Image (tube, rainbow, N blue to C red):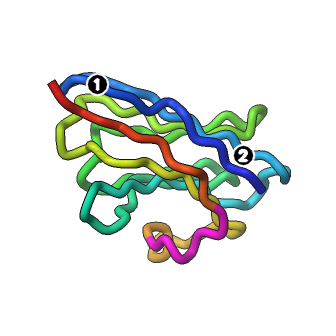
Amino acid sequence: VQLQASGGGLVQPGGSLRLSCAASGRTLNRETLGWFRQAPGKEREWVASIRWSGGSTYHASAVKGRFTISRNNAESTVYLQMNSLKSEDTAVYYCAMSSLSLIYSEIATPARYDYWGQGTLVTVSS
């Protein structure tokens, strides 16, 4: 399995970006895909996840209402639409995949994800 993340860049506060994560190497069925981020000097933080089967989505409170995770079944791609970006959103964003349809209590735990992409840097600055 390979996860290829893209879409990061420099954006001004209040701006928008859309991250993409293309999954290859398996046909997605019951997996859970998620986005995590890690800012300099901080621990990796869960951002959002989506269950491939059924499409249920979950967002961290820090991004709820500003970020939206979605998927494209045909292209095995998950997106993270980020609006109203703030300086504190600056981080390297990683996509990750669990082979399981994670239950809610597990969905924010990095150790529950089996595969990780290479990360894409998002910088929010004026």
Task: Give amino acid for label 2.
Answer: Ala
The residue at 19%/46% (across/down) is 88
Check disc 2 and report the residue beneath it. 23
Tell me where residue 18 appears, x and y as whole percent: 45, 29
How far is mark 2 from mark 1, CA to CA? 26 Å
Asked if residue 102 can be seen in this view, the reply is: yes
Tell me where residue 91 appears, x and y as whole percent: 32, 48
Q: Mark 1, residues whose alpha carbon is within 10 Å: few (<14), some, or many (≥20)?
A: some
The residue at 49%/68% (across/down) is 107
Quadrant assignment for the N terminus: bottom right
Task: Give amino acid for label 1.
Answer: Val
Location of residue 10 (image quadrant): top left
Q: Is residue 43 left or right of residue 105?
A: left
Q: Is residue 15 left or right of residue 97?
A: left
Nearest to the observer: residue 93 or residue 81: 93
Q: Reading the chain from its start, which is encountered first: label 2 or label 1?
A: 1
Seen in the picture, residue 121 relative to 13 is either above or below; the reply is below
The boundaries of the magenta stretch are 109-115
Location of residue 83 (image quadrant): top left
Check disc 1 and report the residue beneath it. 11
Q: Is there a contact, CB below 8 Å, between mark 2 and mark 1?
A: no
